[in-house]
Image: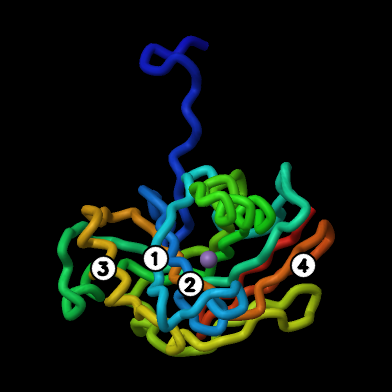
Amino acid sequence: MSNKLFAFEPKVAPRVPIIGDTRQFPVNRIFCVGRNYAEHAREMGNDPDRDPPFFFLKSLDSLVPGGGSVSYPRATDDLHHEIEMVVAIGVSGSEIAKEDAQDHVYGYAVGLDLTRRDLQSQAKKMKRPWDFGKSFEQAAPITAITQTKSCEHLSSGEISLTVNDKVQQIGNLNEMIWNVPEIISFLSQFYQLEAGDLIFTGTPAGVGPLHRGDKLIGRVASLPELVVNII
Ligand code: MN
């Protein structure tokens, strides 16, 4: 069957399920905060007192809505896990004041910022962009979104990741160097934040390598857990 609008069939629009809603959350962009937990900054060889957090992006084909099976990616021998709380933006805005930031939040989810650490390290060394290390197919598994109308705004609570039933990462949301309102306010000085934007808010200490056959369970406060199998 011919398509009059497109040269070939476009991919289905990137989206994430919403808990308690048959409709889905259409994803616009994926922002990520780097080094937002001091212990993680230190384990990566950085000084959190000297270097503030910063941002990078993942492309939309990174999304793995609902988690599940993730293929070990090509071109790496050192795939790393980074468990993160994800903020879903529901109201657009720019130059958002910290006091108003929560009004722009649609909900929260649990996500993994999967990282080809060897490629990222190489890029750092050569002062090149991080894209090859951070943005690739299936690099961002994410749970369904819990809407703020059915949960508190999350500023504290345990964040953890188990790999094959062993706790590898554990921390508390209250350890973020920049909290969620600060992240939203800062980011909105540089971008028009749009409904549909996702923000991965950084990972606590304990990042490490993954292998085929690993089973990951990510937990953030009382949000539904993220289950991912590396195949
Ligand atoms: Mn990360």
Ligand 1 closer than 8 Å to label 3 CB:
no
Q: Earlier in the sequence, mark 4 or mark 2?
A: 2
- Whole-angstrom CA distance, mark 1 to mark 3, is 10 Å
**Residue in view at x 47 percent, y 55 percent:** 16
Q: Element type at marker 1?
A: strand
| Tag 4 and tag 1, C-beta contact below 8 Å | no
Please give the label number shown on residue 33: none
**Which three-letter amino acid code belongs to the residue tagged 1?**
Phe
Q: Quadrant of residue 195?
A: bottom left
Horizontal and vertical percent for residue 54?
39, 65
Q: Element type at marker 4?
A: strand
Question: As displayed, is residue 31 above or below residue 35?
Answer: above
Residue placed under numbered mark 3 in the picture? 186
**Is label 4 or label 1 in front?**
1
Please give the label number shown on residue 54: 1
**Residue in view at x 37 percent, y 70 percent:** 107
17 left or right of 148? Answer: right
**Residue in view at x 20 percent, y 77 percent:** 98
**Is label 4 or label 2 in front?**
2
**Which three-letter amino acid code belongs to the residue tagged 3?**
Phe
Horizontal and vertical percent for residue 57?
44, 52
Q: Quadrant of residue 132?
A: top right
- Whole-angstrom CA distance, mark 4 to mark 2, is 25 Å
Using a 10 Å C-alpha cutoff, classify the residue at mark 3 as few (fewer than 14 neighbours), some (14 to 19) or many (20 or more): some
Question: Would residue 128 be visible to someone looking at this image?
Answer: yes
Horizontal and vertical percent for residue 105?
29, 69
